[in-house]
Amino acid sequence: MPMPIRQALVLGATGLLAACGGTDAECAIDTDCNLFQRCEAHSCVPLGGGGDRDTGPADTDSGTPPDDAGGPTDAGGMDAGPTEMGTGSIFMSQLRTGGMVVSYLASASFTPAGGRTGCTTTEGGGCSTTVCTTAIVAVDAGPPVDAGPPPAAPHAGAIQITGGLLDLTLDPDVATGLYPAATGTTALWSGTEILTVGGAGDTVPPFSETVAPPVSITLTAPALPAAATPLSVDRAADLAVGWTSVGGAPGSIILLLSRTEVAADMVTAANLSCVYALADGAGTVPSAQLSLIPAGSGGSFAIYGGDTTTAAPAGWTVTIAAGEPVADGAGTLGQGSADFL
């Protein structure tokens, strides 16, 4: 059963890990942001929440009568729980070259509810695809007006990552509320550890969860292209994914596909994610999901082995993930550019 996550990250072919964070949160495209973010209005914002979701027919049960003022209810007449405050993501990754870890990254971000517009998420076959459209309107707004600094972003105070080979602390910037990413050139885990991730609490209440990222995973499908050659994805056919793992560790395989189409008057950004149980050894991306990605070149793909969980401090949904790109038997990493046919 896949975790309810929306991912859009492809690490660059240079092997450098990119993140959006710190006091300069501007981005140009989705892949400037981390695994659980997209680029919106030149800012990296978490994926998940805020947009429309295609979940099938609505429940026709009206629940409690209109004159019941006992608080918010869902369509079945039950208490809907705390008001949705927002979403967040905490992401940890490491990159290997020749079997050795050469870099790591840890990042965090939070966005209040209602931060996304023009987005629709469609789920099916263990995958989900989020498509966001933005109209391009040329308007002469006159000279710029200094509106002062923007309000600080919500944050969870100091975020501690412990239990691995290296303990980390992510501290938000006092003025902006944004978290500078932590990077380095050593390993965060070896594959036998359980990482504990906890937020001290601030705008986002305190939380603590654990993840256990696996290693020793070999990709067997799809066949990866030669270096500097894009992966060709047939949008009209199911895409098979396969892998082998050692040790029977828990965890997941996370497949990510994305492409942004820029037209004269509209920008369409599509991000597809599928999450499979590591023990399954294989998975399928349905063509119905692939067909939602605009056809063309210049897209991206990434296949990660990792572990994900969700923290739920009052009113918030915080996705926590740790993983690394998997490689095939020849050592080629499962990440790069993609053409969608």
Image (spheres, helix red, strand yellow):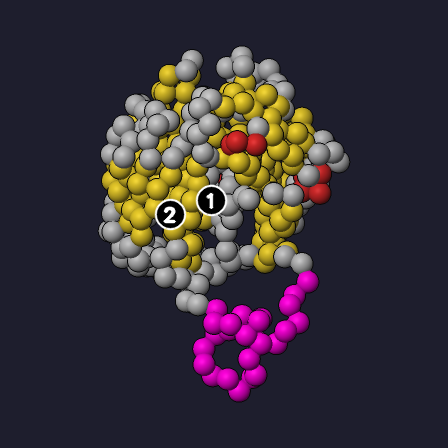
Residue bearing mark 1: 37
Circle 2 is placed at which residue position? 109
Point out residue 329 in the picture as x, y percentages from the top left corner: 54, 14
Instruction: Say which amino acid is labelled 2.
Output: Ser
Secondary structure under badge 1?
strand
How crowded pointer 1 is (Cα within 10 Å; few <14, some 14-19, many 20+) is rated as many
Does 73 lie within the magenta span?
yes
Q: Position of residue 144 (x, y in %)?
A: 42, 56
Res. 278 mark: none
Out of 207 and 98, give the one closest to the viewer. Answer: 207
* Quadrant in which residue 154 is drawn: bottom left
Q: Residue at x 54, y 18 (%)?
A: 328
Q: Main secondary structure of the magenta part?
A: loop
Asked whether disc 2 touches disc 1, contact meaning CB atoms under 8 Å apart, the reply is yes
Residue drawn at the location 63% of the way across and 20% of the way down:
223
Q: CA distance from mark 2 to mark 1?
A: 9 Å
Q: Check the picture and name the quadrant holding the C terminus.
A: top right
- Outermost residue toward the front in this view: 248
Q: Is residue 90 visible in the rendered structure shown here?
A: yes
Label 2 SS: strand
